[in-house]
Amino acid sequence: MNLRGKQKRFLRSKAQRFRSKFSVGKNGLTQAWVDQLDGAMNNYELIKINLQQSADVAPEEVKDFIESHTAIQVVQIIGHVLVLFKESDDEDKRNISLQVKDI
């Protein structure tokens, strides 16, 4: 699903009150980390991740890595926090994506 501006705005407003569920630390970006993230996206659809101070990667590098290895879309980058969205593979857990499609 390619997100339009209104859809991204809606997702940003939803994620505003969320806490970060994942973080990137000194181990950096690995395939195992991306696999865990992808699995979590099937449960939540909208997740915040943050980059710890010990991380050796920039937020743009994390965005490029995630988008090139998964179907996850980066909705927003603010400082060291990224907001991610992916439609769940499980139809029972598609709450946010159904709202996004209606916009």
Image: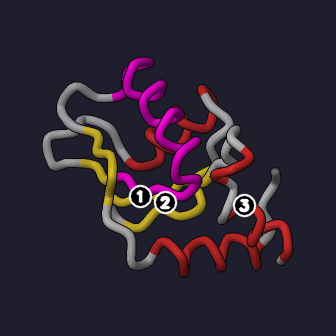
**Amino acid at pointer 1:** Lys
Give the CA separation, mark 2 to mark 3. Answer: 15 Å
Residue matched to label 3: 97
**Residue found at x 51% / y 33%:** 39
For label 2, the SS is strand
**Amino acid at pointer 2:** Val
Comparing marks 2 and 3, which lies closer to the viewer? Answer: 3
Residue matched to label 1: 48
**Would you call the spot at circle 2 few (<14 residues within 10 Å), some (14-19), or many (20 or more)?**
many
First in sequence, mark 1 or 2: give its number.
1
Quadrant position of residue 67: top right
For label 3, the SS is helix
Residue matched to label 2: 83
Q: For the magenta stretch, what is the residue range? A: 29-49
Give the CA separation, mark 3 to mark 1. Answer: 16 Å
**Residue found at x 60% / y 54%:** 85
Predominant secondary structure, magenta span: helix
Residue 80 picture location, percent across and down: 32, 58
Pick the residue in front: 54 or 23.
23
**Amino acid at pointer 3:** Ser
- Disc sitting over residue 56 in the figure: none
Residue 1 picture location, percent across and down: 81, 51
Residue 65 vertical placement versus 3 (above, below) = above
Q: Are marks 1 and 2 in contact (CB under 8 Å)?
A: yes
First in sequence, mark 2 or 3: give its number.
2
